[in-house]
Amino acid sequence: MGLIKYGIITKAHGLSGGLKLSPFSRRPEGLNSIERIYIETVPGQEPAGFDLTERRLDRGSAVVYLSGVDTIGEAEKLTGRNVYIDESELPGLEEGEYYWFELIGLETYTEDGRYVGRVENLIDRALQSVLVVKNGGRETLIPLSEPIIKEINLKESKIVISPIDGLLAGD
């Protein structure tokens, strides 16, 4: 079982233990195929597993009900906690689509072979996502869109970009 970070519990919902879940995905409907989630109930310890008993989409996030979480008090204890799912429960992607966890850690290069840095994080913006690439103390924000992204190669753990003027420091 390989757990990946899926989202975060943002708040309790209702009086009967409902939770507002904000998934790290542009497709929250993927939650419909997930049967079990794991929540970091105690920071630094192994996440605890919960069966999803009910779920519904709500404006880009989801309201979920979990087995064993039946009161607002129990739900409030989970607010702000990271949510994980088993990688095997991820819905399939179409060609050219990637999960965020697949991109973190990839090395980034320009088309002419210059090393830009390592993808450390992603920022989800309304119109497009942005790669946070770090090289030593330098941080570069790279839009995850064409024509800047030329290649994403998971087998070789690299991303090739064609930077526009001013994107990279020193250009």
Image: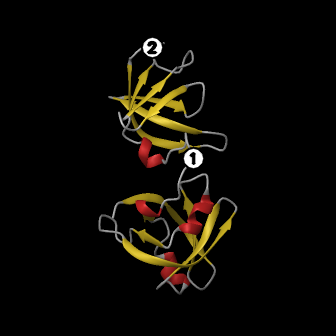
Q: Amino acid at mark 2?
A: Gly
Determine the residue positioned at 44% across, 20% down: 110
> In the visual, does 112 lie left or right of 150?
left
Q: Nearer the viewer, residue 7 or 79?
A: 7
Q: Residue at x 35, y 69 (%)?
A: 47
Mark 2: secondary structure? loop
Residue at 46% in and 64% down? 89
Q: Which mark is residue 170?
A: 2
Residue 72 x, y percent position in the rendering? 55, 82
Q: Secondary structure at mark 1?
A: loop
The residue lying at 42 percent from left, 62 percent from top is 88
* Quarter-of-image position of residue 13: bottom right
Rendered view: 157 above or below 5: above
Q: Earlier in the sequence, mark 2 or mark 1?
A: 1
Which residue, given by chain and number where applicable, does mark 1 sit on?
A: 94
Residues at discs 2 and 1 in contact (Cβ within 8 Å): no
Q: Is residue 63 left or right of residue 108?
A: right
Q: Residues within 10 Å of mark 2 (few under 14, many from 20)?
A: few
As drawn, the label of residue 72 is none
Q: 10 Å neighbourhood of mark 1: few (<14), some, or many (≥20)?
A: few
Callout 1 amino acid: Glu
Q: Nearer the viewer, residue 44 or 67?
A: 67
* Quadrant showing the N terminus: bottom left
Marks 2, 1: nearer the viewer: 1
Q: Position of residue 54 (x, y in %)?
A: 59, 79
Q: Residue furthest left?
A: 45
How much space separates mark 2 and mark 1, taking CA atoms? 36 Å
The residue at the far front in this view is 95
Residue 138: x %, y % from top left: 39, 27
Q: Position of residue 70 (x, y in %)?
A: 53, 87
